[in-house]
Every structure is written in structure tokens, then in C-alpha cells.
Amino acid sequence: MLEKRYIAILILGTLLISTVAFSGCVDPDDDEERPTLLRMGFAWPTDIDPAIGTDKSSAVAFTNFYDPLVFPTQEGVEPWIAEDWDVSEDAMTWTFHLRDDVTFHSGNEMTAEDVMFSMERLVTIGEGFAHMFEPYIDIDESEVVDDYTVRFKLTEPRGVFLPSLVRLYIVDKEEVLDNAVEDADFVYEPWGNDLGRGYLIENSAGTGPYNVYEAVIEDHFYGERFEDYWGPMAENAPDEFRMLALGEAGTERTMFGAEELEITSEWLEHHTVVDIAETFDGKLGAYPEGGALYGMMHTQKEPLDCIYVRKAISYAFDYESQIDDIFPESELMEGILPILLGGAVEQDMPTTDHEKAMEYLEQSQYYPDIVENPEDYEIEASWTGAVPATEHVALMITSDLEDIGLEARSRRYEWGALIDAMYEKETSPHICIVWVSADYPEAGSLLNARYHSRNARSWQQNEWLEDDDIDELIDDALREPDMDERFALYEEVQNELFEMYPSLFGHDQYSKHAYQPYVTWPEAEDPLEYSIPSNGYSVNVRNIEVLPHGER
Amino acid sequence: MKKYIGKRLFWALVALIGLSIFIFYFGRIIPGDPIRMMVSPQTPDHVVEELRESLALDQPVYTQYFYWMRNVFQGDLGFSVYSRRSVTADVQQYLPRSLELIAYAASVQIVGSFLLGIFAGSNIDKWQDHITRLFSYIGVSVPAFVFAIIFQLVFSQNLGWFPTSGSLSEGVATPSRVTGFIGLDALFSGEFFTIGNYIWHATLPAVALAIPGMEQVARMIRSGMITINQKDYISMARGYGLPERTVRFKYLLRPSIIPGVTVLGMQIAMMLGNAFLVELIFRWPGFSRFAINAMLRSDLNTIVATVMIVGIMFAIINIVVDTLVAYIDPRIRYSGS
């Protein structure tokens, strides 16, 4: 009896082990015709609903699953879904003439109704990039002129309305409304449903070069190439684009080595990315996206309310070491904004000069007390645990400040705590180290986000300038319809801001990645030629080539 | 026995209600405005306040608790500001994956700890005992995620015996959802290759998760065997000439495993919380990874749901363990009643 039991266990065990062993025998090299994949790591969460997300991974999803009305370039914008446009003299009426050969992933034809619905949906939900349109667009007066013409009316002149449209992604009205839910957490009037909010969490309803066919939130989005895509596509553009939730260095390294990952995620430390590329004969690439690292100085908090203290800090900071030791892929800032942004100008940026820093410090109203009793003026350099690399910058700042006799300490905040702290003037730290990126490829995007009072409470500002003249200058620039004149106004604002020394201008941010040798990625290989200074647009998978398996 | 279990169930319910009140209030004092973390930085204040109102986060905490409790009884765990959908949907998606991983890890842990414990306890101060002790020290002192990294480097990257990450290979389709448990769903649809492939993927994370607790329990079983082995009734059984096999398995092992079983239960219950890094390293789409990330984003409803799920798991396993121990040693049952 006992022996029979042992025999049964033995047979079962053998069967189980065989099943597991044979199930592992999937040899991918057997099939050279299998689809080419581009698997890339991303930080999560990734919102693929264009009315919800704004961060990098979401922006990459929009670039590949949807099409915007106009497409960003280094020079401004180019026709995309809109072939052409007219603007009234007062810059309050914008008429767009659309392509007539665009189809959605569903097979529906794209028309002006969809463009109008996309704008209406975005501003009704009010999240994501809605802030770029919501206060200025007059939905009631806007209209669909015919199948391929849409007219937007604004409530005030808005020159940057056109570049802002790089964030208006066109959704399939019919598909969205067919999948809208009436009994949902968020119900929008007058629609009486969730405007497809629940549906678009896991589905794409766009016209973009890739179509989501599998979604597991917090884990992955798989997109397959849209065969009826109207736009240009590289000859060897991958058959599938897969966005994977990653960020753990060891996992990415192992996956890269096993060719289960084509492009590493963005937030790995520099030495990790270099190591992965070198170990597995991969390529290293970096590209700017219109973002910069700022040490935002609280201009209303002692002792930073004195411009001479801010100037002293600006000259004490070790700009070169920041690049050499921490962010070798990035470039020193040439002005107060990332230089690739339209309308950004070169300025005579401060360089490390401790003698000059001391001279400025001596002109401060707090001198000599600030060096005799530095503990009374302790400066807090804050960073967030969400981006560990910023700790190095915080430590560098504290060390540099101590070199000129100031007391400073580095302080870590969890991301939520930092957002809370920066929401109030009283609780905002002295210096906060954060990267900020432009939403559209013009200086106005960052000037508005970084220095206009309307955004003073957001985490993109810690300066608390609250300066009416600066606000007015920025508003004038954003209103100006003529691009040359707008850029001239941007220059004026930048010069005014530069003289105020409100921030430490760290570096133009370059996103860095290791990627496989069988991948060709123009934006990463020649960033000055191909990269697009607008968050998410440089991971444009239809431009990336992945060699077929048989040719590697 | 029924009275014993009933009493345990009653106190588990009281503990869970207390836990829900505690975590509901505690979650709301963690820094980080969940709505501001959910939206883009330039979102106007009126939109933020509308969202806050929609989710009843503008209400007093006791009112929010009342709404939450009412919704829980309707199967609704609230809205997640992290995943932007119902927490119930998140739990349905991620929890089965973690439970499957934990079930696998628990099986490895139970079998491994008993074998190692008995092996060491039967060979006191011999080389077998010393080797087991060495493994135990390593197992207890090294956390699961270190094993995960080592296993991934050795068995995946260098030897290529196991997949590096994920839960199914390229080209192996996820079976149609019936229960959400991949193994069960594959079984229902007769996809045995998928089951094998799934187990193959789960092996390294499961073993990494099992090892630390396994070594601890093995040590307890060994110690129990040494203590019980010195009891008079064991000497008497041997004196009566009972076969050594009967003495060892009937009189020695049974009381020796009681402390081990209790600790084993706790180890298994704790796996859900401890699985975070292992799930992260192996890209296992489980609940722990999701829950920790959601917590870091001040996702209040997910925080409450996560803690309650872990609490319920603890309660269930506690009751199972208590019942098992009471079954093994009836004296505990009678004194407990």
C-alpha cells in the first residue's frame, strides 16, 4: 500500500517537473520571422488617457498611441492632423483644416467632430493638459464647420494656443461614447457619463502609429503597429511597442542581457546605464526634452529674500562638478531656460567663483551676522526621495555654501510631503531641487509654469516671486500671436528674471538610456538634429528601427 | 472545537474592525495631498476641489469612514487615485497573482522547513546538523530580496535555467479570466503548457520568498525535537522496544512541530507584505508591488484596502493555525475554551 503511494507521488512529481521543464523550452531563436519588439522601461503610473496624464511615460504613450493636432519640432510646430490653419487678427479665432485620410484604430474615419469632441472632453474632465486650454477656450462658440474643418474660439487673444495644440490628442468620439459609463465615480455634465474615462485607462482610441492590444495597469501596455497609419513610418519600425513598468537596476540589467529589454528606463543612475551598455555591447543615448534641473530659491524667506545672498549662492555652486560627477549626459544651461526651447536665449550665466560669491555675500543686508552666526540663517536644500540623484545635488549645494561660510543642510522629502510643503509660502523650503519640463516647445511654457504667480503653489515653483511686472510680461508674451514678437517678449522676460537670480540654473536635462545594438534611435543618436524639446516626443517609436531577427 | 473556532472568529472580527478604524484615520495623516499628487501641477484649484468633493475627501473623517464602510458592504473598496479606477478592480487583478506566488512559496517553505528540521533534529551534532545550521543562519540573516537578486543573476542570467522576469513567456497567452488565478484559469481551460510555464516563471520568486522563513521554522522544529527527545515518555517508548520510526514520527515529531507550525503560519501571512521587493525584482504583477507604489502616492483607499487584506490574511491564518495546533495537541483546545 505504502509503495503504491510512493509510486503515485513519484509519477505525479515527474509529470509536474516535466511540464515545468518543457514549458521553459520556448526557444525564441527558432523563429526569425517573429515580430520585432521594442520593449522599453518606464516609471509608473502611466496614464494612457490623453485627458488625464502629463508625465513622461504618459506623454510617450500619447506620442505613440494618438496623434496631436499639430506636431512639435525644434522650430515650433508642423502640420499633422491639421494640414493648415488660419488665425484671425485678434488671435481669438483659430480655424484648422484637417487631413481627410486619417482613420482610427477602430476603423472609423477621423473627422472634425472628433477633434471638437477631443477638446471638449479634455476641458470638461479638467485634468491632464486641460490647464493649457480650459481658461481660454470658448467651447460654446467653437464649432465644426464641415467634416474636415474645425473652428476654435478663444475668450482672449492667445498666441501660444497653436503650440499648445501639440497636447490636444485626437480621440475617437464614437468609440469613447460607446464605452462611456453612466454609473461611474466621475460623471460629467451635460454628457451624463464618464466620457470614457474608465475605458481609456486600458484602451487607446486614437489614430496613432501603435494600437494598445494588451494593458495591465502597473505592469505593461503592449501596442501593435497600426497598419492603416496615415503618417510616415521608418522601414524597420518595430511591429510592437511595449511599455514595461521598470526601474529596478538589477532587473533591467538582467533583462537587457537576455535581450528581453531593448531600451532601459530613464531614471537609472548614470553609472548603471553606462555599465549595462558596456557589459552587453549596447549603445548609449541621451536627448534633451525641454526640461532643466533647477535649485528653486525661496525669494521671500530669510536670508534668500536678499538678492545678494542669492547671487552669492549662484556663484558658489559648482556647476562643472554637477555635470562631471552626477549628470555627465547633461549640458550646462546657456540661459535660464533649456536652450532648445523656441524663444529661449543665451545669457551670461554665473560660473563657480567663490571670491565673487563672497563679494556678493558681503553686500548682503545680513552680513556680517550671516557668517558670524550662520546657525541663525541655516539654509535647507531639499530634494525628493522619488528622484534619488537629486540628493547628490543637495549635498553639493550644502558643501558649496559651507565653503563661503554659510550654514546649510540637505533635507529629504517624500514626494507627497514636498508637494504639501511647496503649496504654502510659509512651509516651502529655502531651496528645492526639481526638474521641470516644458509642455510645449516654447519658452512660454516654462516661463508660465516656473515664474508666473498663478502657478506659485505648484511643485514646479518654489521661488514665490509674486511679481506683478513679471506676470504681466509673461501674459503679454503668451497672448502675442506673431511668433517673432512673442519670442522678443520671451527674451525680455528672461532678461528680467535673470537679473533677479531667483534660481540655481543646474543643467539642461538629457534623458539617458542604454539600448540594444540592433536598435537605431535617431533622437538619441543625434539629439541636436532630431530630438524634440517637448516631453515624450523623442520616444517616437515610428522613427525607431529594430533590425529583424534574421539580420542581427 | 466549534466553540473554540467561534470564539477565535469573533475576536478576529473585533480586531479587524479596530484595524479598519485605525488605518482609516492613520492613512489620512500621512503627508501628501492625494488629489494634488493625482493631477498635473498646473491644474486649477477649482478642478482640484471638484475632484476632492467627488471622492468625498472634503468630508470629516468619520463621515468618510461611514461612506467607506457602507460601500465595502456593497463590494466597493473606493476609487484609487493611483490606478484611477476602483480599488476592487485592482484587488481582483493583483491579489490572485500574489496569492498564487505565496501559495507556491508556502508549499516550498512547509516542505523545506519540515525536511530540514527533521533532518537536523534526527542528526544532532552530526555534520548534517551543522550544515543545516549554516543554511539556517544564512536564511535568517539574508532578506528575501537578496536571494531574489542572486537567483536572478545565477539561474536566469548566467545559467539560463529560469526566465528573468514576468509570469508567462513571450507568446504564451494569458488564459481567459474566470477566477483571476492564472493557474486555475489555465487548468479550467485545459492549458497545461500554460500552467507549467507559469510555475516555471514563479519558481525563483517563490523560492526566494520561502527561504528566510523556512530556515527559521526548521530551527524551531529541530529545537522542539531536541527538547521532546529528552522527555521521559520518549525514553519509556524506546524502553518498551517500540520501533524507532514509530517513536520518531508518532511521539517525537508531533509535539515538536507545534511552535514551528505557529511561526510558519505567521511567516506565510507576512509574505504578502514582504513580497514587494521580490515582485519588483522579478516583475511579478502582484499585489504587494502595486500596494506599496499606491501607498507612496497617498492613495488612501488602497492603503486601507491593503492593510485590511493583510489583516484578514493574518486573521484567517491565525485561526487555521490555532485550529491545527488544537488538533495536534487537544490540551490547548480545552484550556483555550
Image: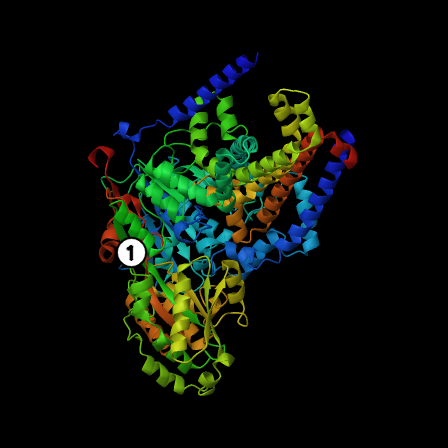
Q: Which residue is mark 1?
A: A287
Neighbor class of circle 1 (other Cα within 10 Å; few <14, some 14-19, many 20+) is many
Q: How far across and down, in percent of the image, does residue A70 sit?
A: 33, 52
Q: In the image, B47: left or right of B62? A: left
Q: Residue at x 66, y 43 (%)?
A: B71
Q: In the image, B30: left or right of A509? A: right
Q: Chain ID for label 1?
A: A
Residue situated in front as seen by the camera: B312 or A503:
B312
Badge 1 element = strand
Which quadrant would the C terminus of chain A be assigned to in this image?
top left
Q: Which residue appears farthest toward the front when viewing the image?
A: B239
From this viewpoint, is residue B116 visible?
yes
Query: Looking at the rendering, which quadrant does residue B268 occupy?
Result: top right
Residue situated in front as seen by the camera: A104 or B283:
B283
Q: What colour scheme has been applied to the protein in the rendered image?
A: rainbow
Which quadrant would the N terminus of chain A be assigned to in this image?
top right
Query: Looking at the rendering, which quadrant does residue A404 occupy?
Result: bottom left
Q: How far across and down, in percent of the image, does residue A67 sit?
A: 35, 46
Query: Looking at the rendering, which quadrant does residue B332 occupy?
Result: top right
Residue situated in front as seen by the camera: A32 or A316:
A316
From this viewpoint, is residue A104 visible?
no
Q: Residue at x 66, y 54 (%)?
A: B25
Q: How far across and down, in percent of the image, does residue A402 sit?
A: 41, 76
Q: Amino acid at mark 1?
A: Tyr
Q: How far across and down, in percent of the image, does residue A545 sit?
A: 25, 42
Count how many numbered circles sit on residues in the image: 1
Judge whether A355 appears above or below B271 on screen.
Answer: below
Q: In the image, A383: left or right of A487? A: right
Q: Residue at x 67, y 47 (%)?
A: B20
Residue situated in front as seen by the camera: A156 or B227:
B227
Judge whether A125 appears above or below A396 on screen.
Answer: above
